[in-house]
Image (cartoon, rainbow, N blue to C red):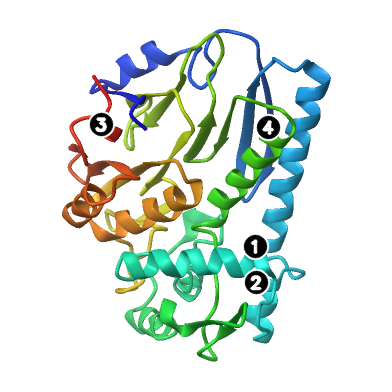
Amino acid sequence: MKKIVFTIILAAAAAVLVYRGELFTPKGKIIKRTRFLMDTVFTIQVPNSLGLRRTEAAMERAFDRMSEVDKKFNVLNQDSPAYRFNSERQPISDPEIYSLVKAGTDISRETGGAFDMTAFPLTETWGFFNHEIATRAVPSAGAIKGALSAVGWKRLSLRDGKVFPADARVKLDMGGIAKGYAIGEAVKVLKEAGITSALILAGGQVQVFGSAGEGKPWRVGVRNPRREGYMAGLQFSEETGISTSGDYERFFEADGVRYHHIVDPRTGYPARGLMSVSVIAPDPVKADALSTALFVMGRDRALAFARKRPDIDVIIVDDKGKIFSSRENPAGAER
């Protein structure tokens, strides 16, 4: 991670000028393909070193693999083990799901419950699975209390390679970690096909390996949470990625208050104090889950957490628009 160059750009207009025409696509022959998965647009970009036909075939296989992950982990897909776990209380024996649930509960333990895959009842109560945000209303205190009583990662029981519901009301939602897993699987597929460099973009998460061509790093912009453009620029020269969670992704406003989808599983209400959290890490699964967890934890606890972990760096924007990072330059990079 020491080959990451980080520059904070305070003016949004300047950010647009710096990156216009090159954001995520440095000059050179880059093949770009997109597909809609997991309720967002996935984009794969690969320098054309193997030839168009071989490169496109590898990209299609990577998309197909991510589509498989989407179907298997989607709690709204009636054919998925996760759906049957929630609706029929069937234990999950699929080893792939078991492994990811185990990784998620480990992160729950590390973050004191700030990341919680059982927060599904809260997400349902707040209506964030419904895209008609204009009609949203703040749930009653009683509704939130009722949903909260069914939430808690310790209500999941993992034993003998299976996931069991330790509580009859517990519901599983892997939306905060499955995207990172899908990206990681796509990276494996591309490498197996002989691809030596690629960038995968999915909503607020980016993963790269190799270079953008001719020794050039991949260039990634960190979105300004309140204005057009990008507030920070990153140059990735080795395999790593960044995942950003923000209060601007899914939200509604009521009586001048912004209510967003990052719900604190300990209080039942959207986490307060921050606009966005970006986690830089080689592991896309950790980056995905920790960007949510650290948002919930708040600025001081998130920064303290990151400074104890050599495998991650964090960029935080608080609710006043001030920018903080876990190190002077994330990942110990030179300015």
C-beta proximity under 8 Å, tags 2 and 1? yes
Q: Residue at x 54, y 17 (%)?
A: 212
Judge the density around disc 3: few (<14), some (14-19), many (≥20) Cα neighbours within 10 Å.
Answer: some
First-in-chain label (2 vs 4): 4
Q: Identify the residue under disc 3.
A: 332
Quarter holding residue 278: top left
Instruction: Confirm whether residue 30 shows in the render.
Output: yes
Image x and y of residue 204, in percent: 47, 40
- Secondary structure under badge 4? strand
Q: Report the amino acid beneath label 4.
A: Thr
For marks 2 and 4, give the CA distance.
26 Å
Identify the mark at residue 73; answer none if there is no mark: 1
Q: Report the amino acid beneath label 2.
A: Ala
Q: Identify the residue under disc 4.
A: 34
- Relative placement, left or right, of 283 versus 316 is right
First-in-chain label (3 vs 4): 4
C-beta proximity under 8 Å, tags 3 and 1? no
Q: Report the amino acid beneath label 1.
A: Phe
Image x and y of residue 86, in percent: 62, 79
- Secondary structure under badge 3? helix
First-in-chain label (3 vs 1): 1
Q: Look at discs 3 and 1 and give the one toward the viewer.
A: 3
Q: Residue at x 65, y 72 (%)?
A: 82
First-in-chain label (1 vs 4): 4
Most foreground residue, 322 or 125: 322
Most foreground residue, 319 or 166: 166
For marks 3 and 4, give the CA distance.
33 Å
